[in-house]
Image (spheres, rainbow, N blue to C red):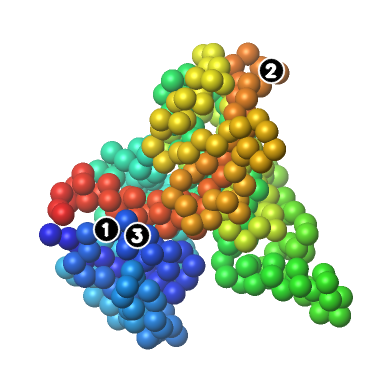
Amino acid sequence: MGYKVAVVGATGNVGREMLNILAEREFPVDEIAALASRRSLGTEVSFGDETLKTKDLDAFDFTGWDIALFAIGSDATKKYAPKAAEAGCVVIDNSSLYRYDPDVPLVVPEVNAAAVEGYAKKNIIANPNCSTAQMVVALKPLHDRATIKRVVVSTYQSVSGSGKEAIDELWDQTKAVYNPTDEVPPKVYPKQIAFNVIPHIDVFLEDGSTKEEWKMVAETKKIVDPAIKVTATCVRVPVFVGHAEAINIEFEDHLDEEEAREILREAPGLMVVDKREDGGYVTPVECVGDFATFISRIRQDSTIDNGLNLWCVSDNLRKGAALNAVQIAEAFGQRVLKKG
């Protein structure tokens, strides 16, 4: 027996990826609904070999449906997620709306899959921020071995994290560089993104950090361990898909790079590609379409007693969003619904 699954926001980048991954991973689906706003009604989307026509989210009745994967913004989620949850459908939400709610579990299945069992208070499970998701998959096995005290992370985040309009802006600005008569002023971003990097993701907060940086701090504490200190600098780079992170970790106990490499090789969801030679590491272009989070450049930090550096790369539309949501659904099915 399988599940009745609704994908909310099925015409967006993440919604389409959710449908792809449900099919790729052969998630046990008895019935599936692709939901979107009324203006997208009837748009065709792919689910494996099937073609689905989107249905009107506003008129959809979630009664009798098991799981709804939400890939719409916080404002729309605030309206529709409670309706689905009240109808008995468990919501797995990709927006930031419920991530910091103490009554809503925030889950990365390789790290804290058991947390899905706390869904019942609101019938909602939250998916973390894309930059946090890939980082905590790498942190958790190392934390279990040597206890992490502090993390310093710099991110290099692709434009797909801002949606289709941002992808178009990078493409159009890149073409315009070679044709100066076609000036493309920034709209999605505050400055030109083509051939540039922007140290600004989300809004600025009073302490000078951005909300994206705050998310990484708060979410790492909620998912892994509230005792871990995290400081982040989040940067948007002219890459279409794939986030990269340079992570510096300080531990309570000594952990040498060889043992860390072996721990990471054995950990779920990770793939270590770490050769000390030209090209012996993974870049964002190479991670696109892959389920794994890739770890490279593992080395000691000689400036502190118990420190390591590593390079972490993942497809942000997959592990950072759609894949993690489907993995949450899998964990929920195995631990709670126990079907299939």
Sequence-first disc among 1 and 2: 1
Q: Is residue 200 visible?
A: no
Residue tagged by mark 1?
27
Q: Residue at x 33, y 69 (%)?
A: 48
- Label 1 crowd bin: few (<14), some (14–19), many (20+), radius 10 Å: some
Tell me if 293 is positioned left or right of 208 in this view: left
Q: Which percent across, then down, holds residue 221?
A: 47, 35
Q: Identify the amino acid type marked 3.
A: Glu
**Which residue shows up at 35% across the image and 43% down it?**
109
The reply to whether the C-beta atoms of the residues labelled 3 and 1 are less than 8 Å apart is: no
Q: Mark 3 or mark 2: which comes first in sequence?
A: 3
Residue flagged by tag 2: what amino acid is it?
Ser
Look at the numbered disc 3 and give the secondary structure of its residue: helix
Give the crowd class for mark 2: few <14, some 14-19, many >=20 residues within 10 Å: few
The image shows residue 109, relative to residue 286, as above or below, that is: above
Disc 2 secondary structure class: loop
Name the foreground residue: 331 vs 217. Answer: 331
Q: Residue at x 47, y 52 (%)?
A: 290
- What residue is shown with label 2? 302
In space, the residues marked 1 and 2 are separated at their CA atoms by 45 Å
Q: Is residue 154 left or right of residue 72?
A: right
